[in-house]
Image (cartoon, helix red, strand yellow):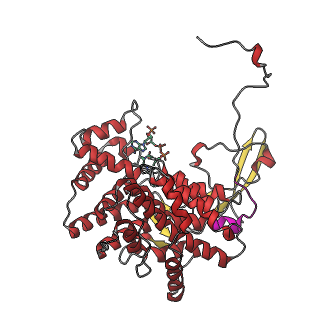
Amino acid sequence: MSETATLSLGDRSYELPVSVGTEGECAIDIRELRGRTGYITLDPGYANTGSCLSDITFIDGDRGVLRYRGIPIEQFGSDPNFVEVAWLLIFGRLPSPEEYRCFAADLTAHANLDEGMKYHFEGFPRSAPPMAILSAMINALSCFYPEYLELEDDVTFRMMAARLISKIRTIAAYSYRHSKGQPYIYPDPKLRYVPNLLHMMFSQPYVEYECEDVVRDALNLVLILHADHEQNCSTSTVRMVGSSQANLFASCAAGVCALWGPLHGGANVEVLRMLEDIHRGNVTPEDYVRRAKSKDSRARLMGFGHRVYKSFDPRAKMLSVVAERLLMTLGKPDPLLDIARKLEEIALEDPYFVERKLYPNVDFYSGIVLRAIGIPINMFTVMFAIGRLPGWIAHWWKQIRTQPGRINRPRQIYTGNGLTDYVPMAERESNVG
Ligand code: ACO
């Protein structure tokens, strides 16, 4: 017999079904709670709310485990290939050589943007935040590909997913070129996903950017480590928007906005600013940690802490190694890496961080890797978005296929005025002065 949970409310009790995942996580299924009891659950921040059953990504936050479709992320480290991982997340298994070749060919074929989109870039000020441009331009794809706005079948979905994964890279590169006032560089069909992104960002009409293997591998790994993280803020946003049956472009544009915030993907920018601040001598690592602990300050130790991980974030561990290796191979030591290690050491010995189980998260070392590659700081969160896109697409599609027609719509407990009469303007007291 399957397990149930018993809920007592006054003199009545209710049996509620329990759902158990493949790795043993348990949930009390409250889908019928309100209908049967008149009560809802209250969970601001959703820390105890499961929004779906999902077979895409597994995290064990206590043991620092992250697996994509069952595969531990550490196994993607030796020969990192972001496109293969994107396929895995979206379609549920590793691609056959033939499937991989087809998908990669689709990405190559659809890298270009409609020439009309260039005029949109022109309209943005040079100083426009690239995340704003990215979100706007992903949404603008809806105008250029109306044939994908109503998704009927797997084949159309596959074409749409390939176009989006390919074009986000071109949009990202163009937003960078625009901010520099440099001419747009067209995608090169001879190049693979990551070298093509760097080519569009850094080549000049008269000088070809040459991508070193170590740089290619490091960026592939950065993208892979960001590729999915189950029901995080931006993925939940994509699912929320998608639940209204908004199209994939609109849903992912919303995901970019959610990712932008400093408590989510924007933390990679804040971490680097923090490290630079310490490097300039404006503040010591000890002061930073002290400030982050103070209840009088809103400051936090950026790149530390996580809603799910209560031990080491495995992505941070891998990125710390990649940062070291990359800097050594390129012969470009970076004092910010030493500062990051010092901060980590201080925090991990401090009872405040130990008691709250706050460890470095993915954003703590990713900025150092991106900086070594030559990515400017205002493009850090854009890189995160390129990486996270396959995860958004996978969750969006899963939701469309498994929950058709069910809109996401939480409830609330109202705490405002009781019944109140409207007062006409002329009868209201002035509160000026
Ligand atoms: N520095 C100092 N204190 C912290 C930090 C931090 N980085 N993170 C959490 N805490 C403290 C909180 O003040 C709180 O203390 P209290 O119990 O005394 O009130 C306690 O730890 C629990 O923190 P919450 O905010 O409740 O944890 P939550 O799960 O809501 O937040 C989050 C997780 C947003 C990641 C948080 O740890 C944080 O703000 N970290 C810094 C920003 C960051 O690195 N974000 C990237 C996360 S990874 C990603 O999204 C890709």
Residue 398 located within the stretch drawn in magenta: yes
Compare residues 288 and 242 and report the one nearer the observer: 242
From this view, report whether residue 122 is shown above or below residue 326: above
- Which quarter shows the N terminus? bottom right
- Which quarter shows the C terminus? top right
Toward which corner of the image does residue 52 lie, by quadrant? Answer: bottom right
From this view, report whether residue 276 is shown above or below residue 395: above
Can you give x and y, in whole percent of width and height, for residue 265 in the image? 45, 53
Q: Please give the range of residues in magenta.
A: 396-408
Q: Is residue 280 left or right of residue 148?
A: left
Q: Is residue 12 left or right of residue 183?
A: right
Can you give x and y, in whole percent of width and height, for residue 28 in the image? 66, 55
Can you give x and y, in whole percent of width and height, for residue 409 in the image? 71, 50
Residue 186 located within the stretch drawn in magenta: no
Task: Looking at this view, name the residue that lies furthest to the bottom.
Answer: 98
From this view, report whether residue 49 is shown above or below residue 22: above
Tell how many labels.
0
Compare residues 404 and 178 and report the one nearer the observer: 178
Q: Is residue 54 left or right of residue 172?
A: right
Compare residues 47 and 268 and report the one nearer the observer: 268
Compare residues 422 and 365 and report the one nearer the observer: 422
Can you give x and y, in whole percent of width and height, for residue 83 in the image? 47, 75
Residue at x 70% of width, y 76% of height: 153
Please tell me in which quarter of the rendered image ligand 1 is found: top left
Residue at x 34% of width, y 69% of height: 203
